[in-house]
Amino acid sequence: MRRSFARLSTLMFALVAQTGAWAAEAQVAVAANFTEPIKAIAAVLEKTTGHTLKVSLGATGAFYTQIKNGAPFDVFLAADDERPALLEREGLTVPNTRFTYATGKLVLWSVDPARVDAQGDVLRSPALRKVSFANPKTAPYGAAAVQVMERMSLADALKPKLVQGESIGQAFNFVKTGNADVGFVAMAQVLQGGKLKEGSMWVIPQAHYDTIRQDAVLLKRGEQNEAAKALLKLLQSPNIKDLIRSYGYDL
């Protein structure tokens, strides 16, 4: 009995050690709009493969600059298709690994359930004090917000009311903390299980802004990283695509 238990313990220790040897960690630069989905995806990756992710969240343009300057990222999940394509042309990615993992949707959101109407007329209200949006130079959702204001002929009227965040995450926080009445944010930031978590929102028609096509790419540093490769494979699986859709993205 004791010998059997000893052999079983030895076998279990060997299996655990072997799994640990196989498991890898990838450093991933992730656009801030994808904060909630990447948390869920990282959990699935660890549960199914043992691999883990070290996630950095921020603005796509800022990550592009960091990667060009040698930042130690293995994978880039951008909020556009422009920066990953640029990195590809600059020889900083593994060839033939770039793909669109999500298409984003822009919404106007407030924590006040009565503030935002279904047509976005709140943007024309004299009572509106502050409107948050992300830096259009570094955040694709910020650039989309500028397009909305311009196409609605509201750019000049809203200019003195604008509060700019460095990322879509900061633009969201301005509204969440009451420092802005409403904000241009990603639908994924305000949905949970396909439903609005709190407040009120206007789903901005696609005609008001260019399509936000979000690309993923394997960077040169991650070419031999098994966790990085496993993440990109997982992003293209049917179940994870359904999960991404549940946050309001198109695919």
Image (tube, helix red, strand yellow):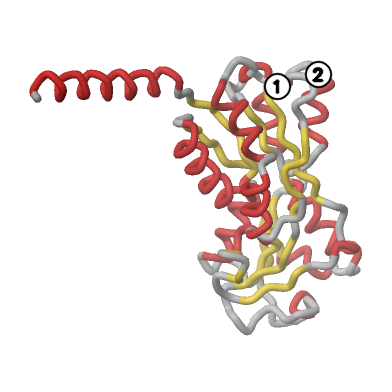
Q: Is residue 135 above or below residue 160?
A: above
Q: Residue furthest front?
A: 1
Q: Amino acid at mark 2?
A: Glu
Q: Is residue 228 above or below residue 184?
A: above
Q: Is residue 224 above or below residue 247?
A: above
For mark 2, what is the residue?
90
Residue shown at the point (59%, 25%) measured from the top left: 73
Q: Nearer the viewer, residue 128 or 115?
A: 115
Position in image of residue 167 (x %, y %) = 64, 48
Q: Is 8 placed left or right of 65 in the picture? A: left
Residue shown at the point (54%, 65%) measured from the top left: 176
Position in image of residue 230 (x %, y %) = 59, 29
Q: Secondary structure at mark 1?
A: helix
Q: Is 105 placed left or right of 42 in the picture? A: right
Residue shown at the point (72%, 65%) measured from the top left: 107
| Numbered mark located on residue 68 in the image | 1
Residue shown at the point (78%, 19%) measured from the top left: 95
| Numbered mark located on residue 173 in the image | none
User: In the rendered image, which quarter contains the N terminus?
Assistant: top left
Q: Which badge, 2 or 1, comes first in the chain's sequence?
A: 1
Q: CA distance from mark 2 to mark 1?
A: 9 Å
Position in image of residue 103 (x %, y %) = 77, 50
Q: Amino acid at mark 1?
A: Lys
Q: Quadrant of residue 208?
A: bottom right
Few, some or many residues within 10 Å of mark 1 (<14, 14–19, 20+) = few
Q: Quadrant of residue 111?
A: bottom right
| Callout 2–callout 1 Cβ contact below 8 Å | yes
